[in-house]
C-alpha cells in the first residue's frame, strides 16, 4: 500500500467499504460529506483504483476494494486494541451513541431498566433501539448500524461474539379477582380458559405451551394470537383470558395481575448478548456490555 496513506485515510476507507454510501460513512466518522468525498478522491489516486462505483442505491465496491476490506478491518482493529489498552473510560462524561437490536419484550424488560440506570451513571450516552432482524444482523453489525444485540444463543450468527445474560421462564397471568381461578392454577382450569398466545410472525395459534400440553395428552383453547408480548398484560387485565408470558415482563405488575405458577412445566429460553469484533476492545462498549450483564443478574 502506498506509504503516503495515513491512518485517517484508512479509517475513511474502512467506513466507506462498510457503509457503501458516502453520506452514511461521513455520519459514522463525524465528517462532512464533502470532506469524505475528498478523502475518497485521494484514496482513488493513491491506490490506482476507483474503489467504489456509483449505483442505483449507494455504491458498489470494486474487486480491489473487496480484497482490501477484511485485512484493512483486521489491521485497524489491532491498532484500536493497542490504543485502548490502559485507556480509562469514564461513563459520567461519555457521549457515545450505541445501537442495540432486541425484541419488544427485551426492550421493555431489560433495556428500559438499562436506560434508567444510564440516566444516573452515563447521562451523556445515547441508546438507539433497533428491531431485531436476525437475518440482517450480520451485515448491520459489519456496517456499524447495530453495535450489539440481545437474542437467544441458538440464533446468534457463528462469527459474532456471545455472552450469556440470563435464563427466562414462563409464568401464567390472569386478572385479579378472576372468577374461574382459585388460589392454585390446576391443569383442568388452565385448559378450560381462553388463552392469549404470542406469535411474533403473526397468526400462529400454537407454541411451546401447546407442545407441553400435547405431551400430557391435553390441549388448550387459544382465543387470541398477538404479534407482541407488550399488549398481552393489558388484554389480560381487561378480560377473563389467561396468558403464558416471560416472567421478567410482569415482575412490576403485581398490583394489576395475578402471577401464577403454570400447572405443568413449559420450557423457557436463554438470552445472550452478541456483538461484532469491530467493537470488542472499544472501552465504552466494553463497559456497557459489562453493565448490561450486571443489570441482568439483578433483574
Image: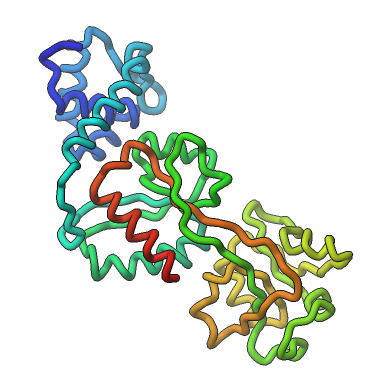
Return the residue nearer the eye: 230 or 77: 77
Residue 150 placement, left or right of 96 = right
Q: Residue at x 42, y 38 (%)?
A: 140
Q: Is residue 28 above or below residue 122?
A: above
Q: Residue furthest right?
A: 217
- Residue reaching furthest to the top: 48
**Residue that lies at the very extreme toward the left in this rendered image:** 4
* Image spot of residue 90 (x, y percent): 17, 57
- Looking at the image, the residue that sits furthest to the front is 86
Name the quadrant of the N terminus.
top left
Give the image location of residue 273, x and y in percent: 44, 51
Using the image, determine if residue 80 lies above or below residue 218: above
Q: Position of residue 64 (x, y in %)?
A: 33, 12
Q: Nearer the viewer, residue 95 or 22?
A: 95
> Is 203 left or right of 26, judged from the image as shown?
right
For the C terminus, the quadrant is: bottom left
Which residue is painted at 66% across and 57% down in the image?
199
For the point 16% across and 17% down, the residue is 42
Which of the pair 221/288 is nearer the observer?
288
Color theme of the render: rainbow
Amino acid at each position: 500500500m502506498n506509504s503516503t496513506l495515513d491512518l485517517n485515510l484508512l479509517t475513511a476507507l474502512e467506513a466507506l467499504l462498510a457503509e457503501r454510501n458516502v453520506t452514511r460513512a461521513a455520519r459514522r466518522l463525524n465528517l462532512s460529506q464533502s470532506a469524505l468525498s475528498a478523502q475518497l478522491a485521494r484514496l482513488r489516486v493513491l491506490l490506482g483504483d476507483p474503489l467504489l462505483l456509483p449505483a442505483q442505491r449507494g455504491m458498489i465496491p470494486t474487486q480491489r476494494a473487496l480484497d482490501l476490506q477484511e485485512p484493512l478491518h483486521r489491521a485497524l482493529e489491532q491498532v484500536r486494541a493497542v490504543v485502548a489498552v490502559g485507556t480509562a473510560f469514564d461513563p459520567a462524561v461519555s457521549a457515545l451513541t450505541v445501537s442495540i437490536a432486541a425484541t419488544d419484550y427485551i426492550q421493555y424488560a431489560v433495556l428500559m431498566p438499562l436506560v434508567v440506570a444510564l440516566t444516573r451513571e452515563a447521562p451523556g450516552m445515547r441508546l438507539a433501539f433497533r428491531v431485531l432482524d436476525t437475518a440482517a444482523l450480520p451485515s448491520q453489525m459489519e456496517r456499524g448500524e447495530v453495535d450489539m444485540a440481545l437474542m437467544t444463543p441458538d440464533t446468534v450468527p457463528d462469527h459474532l461474539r456471545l455472552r450469556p445474560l440470563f435464563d427466562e421462564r414462563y409464568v401464567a397471568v390472569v386478572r385479579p379477582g378472576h372468577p374461574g381461578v382459585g388460589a392454585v392454577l390446576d391443569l383442568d382450569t388452565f385448559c378450560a380458559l381462553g388463552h392469549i398466545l404470542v406469535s411474533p410472525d403473526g397468526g400462529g395459534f400454537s407454541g411451546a405451551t401447546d407442545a407441553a400440553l400435547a405431551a400430557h395428552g391435553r390441549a388448550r383453547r387459544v382465543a387470541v394470537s398477538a404479534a407482541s408480548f407488550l399488549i398481552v398484560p393489558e388484554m389480560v387485565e381487561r378480560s377473563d383470558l389467561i396468558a403464558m408470558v416471560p416472567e421478567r415482563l410482569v415482575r412490576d405488575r403485581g398490583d394489576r395481575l395475578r402471577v401464577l405458577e403454570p400447572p405443568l412445566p413449559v420450557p423457557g429460553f436463554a438470552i445472550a448478548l452478541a456483538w461484532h469484533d469491530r467493537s470488542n476492545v472499544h472501552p465504552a462498549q466494553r463497559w456497557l456490555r459489562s453493565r448490561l450483564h450486571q443489570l441482568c443478574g439483578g433483574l
